[in-house]
Image (tube, grey):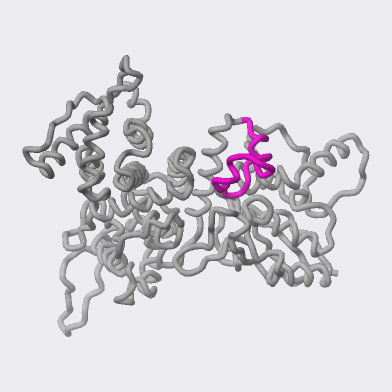
Amino acid sequence: MSKYTMTIHTVNNIVGHFFMEIKDPKGKTLAVRGFGPEEIGDHSEFSESPSQTKGESKDDSKRLGEIGKYLSSKPISLSKEEADKAKKFLEKPGKDWEFYSLNDRNCVDFANEAIKKAGLKGDVDDYLSKEQRRKVNAGASYSRFKFGQDRMKREEEDAKGLHDDGIEGYDGAVKEPSKENDLIEGGADDDELKGGEDDDYLRKSTLPQKDKEVEAYSQWFQEQMNIPGDQADELLGKQMEDLTEDEVYDLMKTPAYQSSTDPRREKAVYTVKNWFDRHYGTESAKYDSIGKMIEPELKIKPPKEKQEPKAGNGEPMEQAVQKLGKAFGMAAKTDGKTQTVQGLQEGLNLLASKLKAPHNEKASSKLNTSFVQPSKLKLDGLFGPKTLRALKGYVSDHGVEKIKDGLAMGRLAKFTEQTKVNRKPPFPLYQAVDKAVEPLYGKEAKSMSKNLSNGRRSTLWGEALQHDLNEQGSKLFKQDWQPIKTDGDLGPKTENAFSKIAQDKDPHDMVSSFGDILGFWNK
């Protein structure tokens, strides 16, 4: 007799989101559900305390169409009664699941609870395929750490012949030694990283403590970046030349293209127009002798198969997101998560004011426009849909490096704002500038600086800042401005000059000028 089945799917990316699928005996899908933070209004209900994050059971059926982007367990056989119990829980998990927690109530725990509700033995990690368990991502690591201990003990006993029964749907492979780090799904919040019982998972990692915190913040950032948008967002997130003809026509059916009030319309119209210009040319329409328009011929053949999203520099979007995640993690390790998100938002606002889209120009060789923000992002420290949409747009159009530049300047803008409010820097200027700018130069940074006997350093970016301060100061204070040395040493005199200008100038404009000197807004 045919059975109902339940399958555990895991998204094949750095986050590794878990979702469950239940089918009837004829193979018809009855439910596809996962669990995550609830999205309300302009942002997800995500606060600094995981216990205050609203959660919801989500329909993940659209993920089933993303072939190659997820892994699946073996189907787990269920009776009708077991399937009904599991389906009921997945669709209406109840009051115990009103909140989402990175540490003990996430998508992995949700999948595990569905197994329990069905009355099955074992935990979620028992049913994952060997490939799913070996995957280097947050979801798999969390599953191994929280639910894999009994299974691994059982595998050792199985190898010794102590058990002759198995769990259906579990491949029984003995776990091989792994170098993967045991990190929770999506990272951690500021308070969790400071210690306490929630810090146990960090001690399981082989990384140094500071790197574990960077990794946790990085994982959280990447989880936010992997939250899917609507159809228009996903299509506009691709390089224009990578769109298939069907995708272009799909884009033309969306509100982003059709609604004059949709903030994405400008980019959607530009993308469609330049797609047709690229593939069919820009010549005027031709007509035959009876006035019927002649069907235009293709100049360049568009892709036949759907392409994976890419960043503006051509690298795979998943790889770009990982790089950005590392940059975000390093910043959040120093500044904290909320302030780093605020710095990122300020950085995106700077990019919006500096990188204009050539909507009134002919298609460039790149044939792709800048993402245009309809208005400044609110500096609320919340990674909401507007922030996410702007960030994805800039990555798609300009690549990772421009976002890193924006984040660096955004962090300095927050420092400048604090200096303005307090009438003095909250900590030494050279530290703020070094931690924001130095990572942008990578290995070359060492050759751009030299140690001084006073314990500070002379740096080329410090010299650039001093030059910019002299320019801004002379414009603001005229003959009353006392020029500072441009020696790259950001000592007390430079700090006083910085504080003086900060009292009279908007932090956004002040930092924007420094970005001009560094060449961040050239493209």
Point out residue 42 in the picture as x, y percentages from the top left corner.
44, 66
Quarter of the picture holding the N terminus:
bottom right
* 218 with respect to 270 (left or right): right
Residue 492, position as x, y percentages in the image:
27, 28
Q: Residue 391: x percent and y percent?
A: 38, 54
Which is more toward the observer, 444 or 480?
A: 480
Q: Is residue 515 left or right of residue 427?
A: left
* Residue 371 occupies quadrant: bottom left
Residue 496, given in percent of the width and then of the height, sits at 24, 34
Q: Residue at x 37, y 61 (%)?
A: 236
Residue at horizontal 33 percent and vertical 44 percent from the top: 422
Q: Picture quarter containing residue 452?
A: top left
Between 280 and 13, the residue placed more toward the observer is 13
Determine if residue 313 is in view. Answer: no
Q: Which residues are magenta?
A: 183-206
Residue at the bottom extreme, as displayed: 290
Question: Which residue occupies 37% across, 71% down?
Answer: 249
